[in-house]
Image (cartoon, helix red, strand yellow):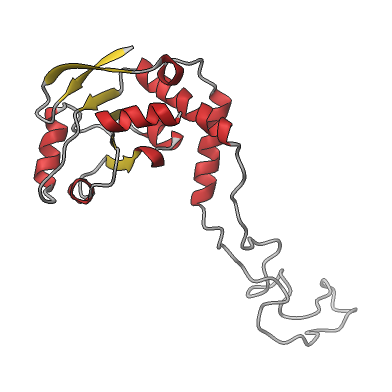
Amino acid sequence: MEIAVFNIAGKETGRKAELKDTVFAIEPNDHAIYLDVKQYLANQRQGTSKTKERNEVSGSTRKIKRQKGTGTARAGSVKNPLFVGGGRIFGPQPRDYRFKLNKKVKQLARKSALTYKAKDNGILVVEDFSLEAPKTREYASIISNLKIDGKKSLLVLNEPDKNIYLSSRNLPNTKVVLYSELTTYDILNSTSLVFVESSLENIQKSL
């Protein structure tokens, strides 16, 4: 499958970029996508939620009333979880939510997500470009020229470009990543996926 290459003015250059069927036209695997997105979101969790249990609450351990004859339930101390200010029963504890996912499953998930994006005509290819200085206005004009302003856009670069990154970070619904950092979640979370020519070549080689 071939797709037109645009310049930053939003006009076709007359060249075509090839989207390989082995990456952009496979049989999508929804379960692989689910697992990869689940792992990505799990890895974002800090897992630092913590409440104090009975043995960690400060307070006296003196028995507050006699065992029998009060007509109410027995109680051993003010740290009893049933009392206000007592410990928390089965509260959250620090934990690691990360889990392992095989490399081939992650690759299959990315290919499946790229296939869905290609079917929805959500992929654009622009010729390699750079900005002389960080200018949000210039990046906004590029987005406008490509007619994707107002949409969630993801620009995939071949190599780090500080000026492009700084120019885009103040704009809502825009994100810039390297091709090596492209995740299934980012692909699915964007409406328009914009590759620069060199990054498209490398992502196809890596997958």
| Residue nearest the observer in this picture, 91 or 9 | 9
Residue 125, percent from left and from top: 24, 25
At 70% from the left and 61% from the top, the residue drawn is 90
Rendered image quadrant of residue 128 = top left
Residue 153, percent from left and from top: 27, 34
- Can the viewer see residue 191 in this picture? no
| Residue nearest the observer in this picture, 114 or 19 | 19
Residue 168, percent from left and from top: 21, 45
Residue 22 versus residue 85 in the image, above or below? above
Residue 174 versus residue 114 in the image, above or below? below
Rendered image quadrant of residue 3 = top left
Q: Count the marks.
A: 0
At 64% from the left and 73% from the top, the residue drawn is 84
**Lateral position of residue 195 relative to residue 77, left or right:** left
**Lateral position of residue 25 relative to residue 59, left or right:** left
At 51% from the left and 53% from the top, the residue drawn is 45
At 34% from the left and 32% from the top, the residue drawn is 190
Task: Quarter of the image for the N terminus: give it.
Answer: top left
- Can the viewer see residue 193 in this picture? yes
**Lateral position of residue 120 relative to residue 125, left or right:** right
Residue 104 versus residue 14 in the image, above or below? below
Residue 166, percent from left and from top: 20, 51
Farthest residue, direction right: 68
Farthest residue, direction top: 1
